[in-house]
Amino acid sequence: MATANDYLAARDAEIMTPVYKMLGMRVGVVTGQSARCERRAAYHCDITYTTAKEIGFDFLRDRLIRRHQKFSGQNAIAAMTGQTTGDTDSPVGRGLNFILIDEADNVLIDEARTPLIVSSTPDRIAQAKLALYQWGAKITDSFTAEVDFTIDPETKSVSLTAAGRRRVRTIGQPAELSRTPLVDIYEQIEMAIHVAQNYFAQRHYVVRDGEVVIVDEFTGRLAEGRKWRSGIHQAIEAREGVEISVETGEAARITIQDLFLKYRALAGMTGTVANSAPELRNIYSVRVIDVPTNRPPQRVQMPAVVYGSAQEKWHAIADEVATMLKIGRPVLIGTRSIDKSETLSGILADRGIDHEVLNARHLDREAQIVADAGQRGKVTVATNMAGRGTDIKLAPNALATGGLHVICSELHDSARIDRQLIGRCGRQGDPGSWRQFLALDDDLLKVGLGQRRAETLLKHANNPGSSLTRFAALFYSAQAAIERNHYQARKHLLYHDRQRQKFQREMGQDPHLDTAGSE
């Protein structure tokens, strides 16, 4: 039984275990904190609750163990992964038989392209490489767009201009770089600029205990143990001034898409997959069946509103919160990132509006915040953590005021993520309502409609007396364009992955372990 995160896996197992025990079945749970002995015991239960990530990593580790048991009989996992527990000499899994997926669209579509990688221990990193990361991060802010470098609007890749390369050569370099090829220096400066332009703290990552930790864009949770590849993670570490981690090689890898295609039987459930039925049929050969709700929904959609800037939008959201509080309704506000949730929190605090913030910085209080979110007059500002799988139970006095009101502060790249947030209200026949807030300076318009058209739309923001609501449909058009691009990317990934695996099998290689040069 696979679900979207450790929290849901542990919670659902706890809820359902009494029922399974009555039926004579044993239940196990695997989370990121589970030791190998605990994993082995859990996988050998009748039902195992876990996440796609944990299944994938255990599949790869088991594959490594079996290979080295076959050819050398030695415990190579300990050498490859640095584990010294003495409990790494036998597989933990039992094969890929039947998988039931909760939040199936998140796992099979949103996370489909995510590679799961077991890293090998690298050689000692050269001082020159460390110096290059640090020097690149130090000088990046002195480079000017369109003068020293250009950015491809589609791929977001950075290229130094002739002037930018001259600048690199004239800036004083550390002595450690004296033997570093100039082309490597150019590439690292381009990487450092790319990181500065596209990766932001409190949005894409947080710095915790001197470590850069990725924030998962789909769930809003910390992606423990994951690192960006191709030197991106190290460039961010250098920019943040924390210890630069060693770049690792690959001992084994698999994508989540390929992992679940290996199961003999696959099924799942989610409330937001109807529009993705063709993709699931084409890639996973599964049908989508619509199950009616237990009780007729009473969810009310309020008209979307569009503002000229994000700042205007945040203050308008605060106004709506104040209006809802006057009648005692609980309010849930969804944001896309940690920094935006805290921006709105600051505005609400300035107005004296009591509220709670649920993001990756408040994991220890997650259960309590969710439990209180349905109380009369309660305001909760959250990232995507409050979306999938979160059941906000309404207090009786909150039902009488009209139920939970959900405020969507911006559109996501996928409409399914928006629908997950909207689905927190009006559940099981309860009353509820929601409203979409939009702003013309949203990056979604740049990505979906193009830079030029987005800039043209932004000019309307300063027209006095001009109604901006007429532009709401363009946001959904931009979102649909991004969804199409992501779908095409997933199709291409599947095609190239199948071609690579076919070639490697013909060569007598293991497509998941012999990964070198397979990009």
Image (spheres, helix red, strand yellow):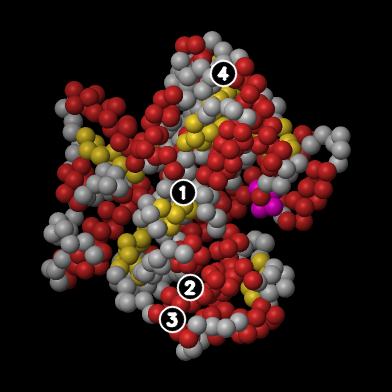
Is label 1 in a helix, a strand or a loop? loop
The C terminus lies in quadrant: bottom left
How far apart marks 1 and 3 lie (CA) works out to 32 Å
Q: Residues within 10 Å of mark 2 (few under 14, many from 20)?
A: many
> For the residues marked 2 and 3, what is the alpha-carbon distance in whole angstroms?
9 Å
- The residue where tag 2 is placed is 133
* Amino acid bearing label 2: Tyr
Query: In this rendering, would 514 be left or right of 37?
Result: right
Q: Earlier in the sequence, mark 2 or mark 3?
A: 3
The quadrant holding residue 149 is: bottom right
Nearer-N-terminus badge (4/3): 3
Q: Which mark is drawn over residue 216?
A: 1
Name the amino acid, label 1.
Answer: Asp
Look at the image and tell me in which quarter the N terminus lies. top left
Instruction: State which tag comes first along the sequence, 4 or 1.
Output: 1
Residue range highlighted in magenta: 444-448
Q: Is residue 153 left or right of residue 235?
A: right
Q: Where residue 170 sits: x, y (%)?
A: 63, 85
The answer to whether 11 appears left or right of 24 in the picture is right
